[in-house]
Amino acid sequence: MVATKTKKRKTAAKNGRKTVSTNGRKPAKKKPAAAKRKTKKRSPRKPRYEPVLELPPLSPDECQGLRMSIAVNGVLTPILVDSDGPVRRIIDGNHRKQFADELGYDCPEIVKSDLNEDELRTLARALNIARRHLTRNQKRQLVADQLIETPNFSSRRIGKGLGIPHATVVAVRKELERTGTIPILEKTEGLDGRRRTTRIANTHEFYRTPTHAVEALLDREEFQGVVWEVASGDGSIVKVLKNYSYRVKSTDLTTGTDFLKARASAANIITNPPYSLAEDFLIHAKKLAKHKVAMLLPIYFFRGRNRFDIFKGDGFPLKRIYMFSQRLTFSLKFEGQLVGEAGCHGWFVWERGYRRQATIDWIPNSK
Ligand SMILES: C[S@@+](CC[C@H](N)C(=O)[O-])C[C@H]1O[C@@H](n2cnc3c(N)ncnc32)[C@H](O)[C@@H]1O
């Protein structure tokens, strides 16, 4: 018996196997290879990254500059992501992440997980606007995207969120409203979460003309017969005309007369029209006025289509422009507050049958 055990051990040693004493029990079964693999520690899965927003692409120069800087220095500014989970949305740093991955570099991250979807998107836009040299149109496009997503936020709130001047947001909002891309809302929500009345009262572009601007015209230009103020708003031009003893007819869309549909005629028409309709107003006014048309218009009225006919070509030519040498400030109700809006304006006067050259005169500071 002893001799046989020794023989077995010798044979095993010869075959290079290890012998384990089993104390008479059956030897434990060898674990299959697959089971062994199961217990091996797995390396953690790489998270997947996606952008919060598709933002304007980098210019080729910007791309090259950023790539080279990362190649030399690594990613020095951490990217901003919304979580440390398996799917991470990049709020800021899409390009840094892309180049770091391409170069096989680490990309440090800061996690900002306390934002809702709207806030995430706003922050992504704001950081993009702040960091990059975007063109004016690219900036306006980002503002438009934001307005389309959150038209119910006040322009002031959107401006603050994006770090963009309030006036730019207002201008883009007007454009989107005019084209029907976003609704004209009666109330919007401010930064403090309170809902306030908007400039719905200004849907028809109500801006009050300052008295001194009307006086500056009437001191320089005479009108024979009745004067019709065809978009009179709350009557600031009408009041001055009456002070100068003119017989005045006064109408406005808000009191039931759409001038563009009006058929009545008058000796003269004087107004400060809604600028989005200025050209239509002028063409129609020339059909209805017997003598003169005077309109307070922004200087950019010179640009654009059809201007030759408007100024020279139809027997009712431009006679004079009285340019204000100082910017005019109009008061208007906007988002619940009375604010001023300034611009470069002049009185443009047309006279039926006028044959001489049109001239420009300057109105010195008339306040
Ligand atoms: C710039 S504000 C001028 C208001 C007033 N003329 C003044 O100078 O104080 C333009 C005015 O045009 C009016 N309006 C807009 N569309 C009109 C239309 N189709 N027909 C008549 N008035 C209109 C608005 O209601 C608003 O009062």
Image (cartoon, rainbow, N blue to C red):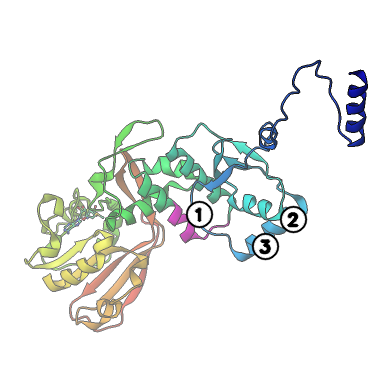
Callout 1 environment at 10 Å: few (<14), some (14 to 19), or many (20+)? some
Q: Amino acid at mark 1?
A: Leu
**Which of the marked residues, 1 or 3, is nearer the chain's N terminus?**
1
**Horizontal and vertical percent for residue 71?**
74, 55
Q: Give the main secondary structure of the magenta stretch.
A: helix
Q: Tag 1 or tag 2, which sits nearer the N-term?
A: 1
Q: Amino acid at mark 3?
A: Gln
Direction from residue 362 to residue 290 in the image, left or right? left
| Position of residue 7 in the picture relative to residue 54 (left or right) | right
Foreground disc of the pair 2, 1: 2
Is 176 rendered above or below residue 82? below
Residue 260 on image: x %, y %: 14, 64
Q: Which residue is mark 2?
A: 71
Q: Secondary structure at mark 1?
A: loop
Residue at horizontal 66 percent and vertical 33 percent from the top: 35
Q: x, y percentage for residue 300?
A: 37, 67
Q: How many tags in the picture?
A: 3
